[in-house]
Image (spheres, rainbow, N blue to C red):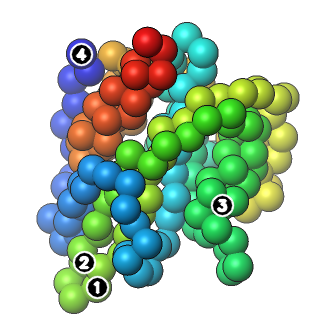
């Protein structure tokens, strides 16, 4: 059971009224263009979810933009190292967001991941700052990450984690 989703701020409501985030469950993404982001819902061995907070930003899951000539898996692993100082031992694509803004559409892939190594935190090369890192219980995720569109993604990631445990 997931925790409640907090009310959106005025800024978030304005953004969400002009941009549509449409969740698609599944693992087929080869036909999608452009893929602009890849993020991981990362679990520690006890099932807690990793969240990060960049300086002066809100809590979120780690991830970012693939670099030129980088596969989405390479991008995911790099972003997890840079933003959260973790490595993963297992991963599975669980779906993607189709992000529609006016006449433009982009795609953001989402993976469920099992954390292998948690390292001491270091500077994120993008922000040149150290991100906050926290592991939260599944039921408490939305107490920290105030993005209502994430609900089906988190549910799918939790299903993946539970299947791995059985």
**How far apart are the alpha carbons under marks 4 and 1?**
35 Å
Q: Tell me the element at label 1.
A: strand
Residue 10 point in image, percent of width and height: 21, 53
Q: Residue at x 24, y 54 (%)?
A: 23
Dot 1, crowdedness within 10 Å: few (<14), some or many (≥20)? few
Dot 3, crowdedness within 10 Å: few (<14), some or many (≥20)? many
CB within 8 Å, label 1 to label 2: yes
**How far apart are the alpha carbons under marks 3 and 2?**
24 Å
Q: Earlier in the sequence, mark 3 or mark 2?
A: 3
Pick the quarter of the image with the C terminus.
Answer: top left
Which residue is the site of mark 3?
A: 75
Q: From the viewer's perspective, is the residue at label 4 or at label 2 nearer? A: 4
CB within 8 Å, label 3 to label 4: no
Is 31 located above or below residue 149 in the figure?
Answer: below
Q: Tell me the element at label 2.
A: strand
**How far apart are the alpha carbons under marks 1 and 2?**
5 Å
Q: Earlier in the sequence, mark 4 or mark 2?
A: 4
Q: Earlier in the sequence, mark 4 or mark 1?
A: 4
Which residue is the site of mark 2?
A: 101
Which residue is the site of mark 4?
A: 1
As drawn, which residue projects farthest toward the front? 166
Dot 2, crowdedness within 10 Å: few (<14), some or many (≥20)? some
- Residue 136 visible in image: no
**How far apart are the alpha carbons under marks 3 and 4?**
31 Å
Which residue is the site of mark 1?
A: 104
Pick the quarter of the image with the N terminus.
Answer: top left
Q: Earlier in the sequence, mark 3 or mark 1?
A: 3
- In this rendering, position of residue 74 left or right of residue 19: right
């Amino acid at each position: 059971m997931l925790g409640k989703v907090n009310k959106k701020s005025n800024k978030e409501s304005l953004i969400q009224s002009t941009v549509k985030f449409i969740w698609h469950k599944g693992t087929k993404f080869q036909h999608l263009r452009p893929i602009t982001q890849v993020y991981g819902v990362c679990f520690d061995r006890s099932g807690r979810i990793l969240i990060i907070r960049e300086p002066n930003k809100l809590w979120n899951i780690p991830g970012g933009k693939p670099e030129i000539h980088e596969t989405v898996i390479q991008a995911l692993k790099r972003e997890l190292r840079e933003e959260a100082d973790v490595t993963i031992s297992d991963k599975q694509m669980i779906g993607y967001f189709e992000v529609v803004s006016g006449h433009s559409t982009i795609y953001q892939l989402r993976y469920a991941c099992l954390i292998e190594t948690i390292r001491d935190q270091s500077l994120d090369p993008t922000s040149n700052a150290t991100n906050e890192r926290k592991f939260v219980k599944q039921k408490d995720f939305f107490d920290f990450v105030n993005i209502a569109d994430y609900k089906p993604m988190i549910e799918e990631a939790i299903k993946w984690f539970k299947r791995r445990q059985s």
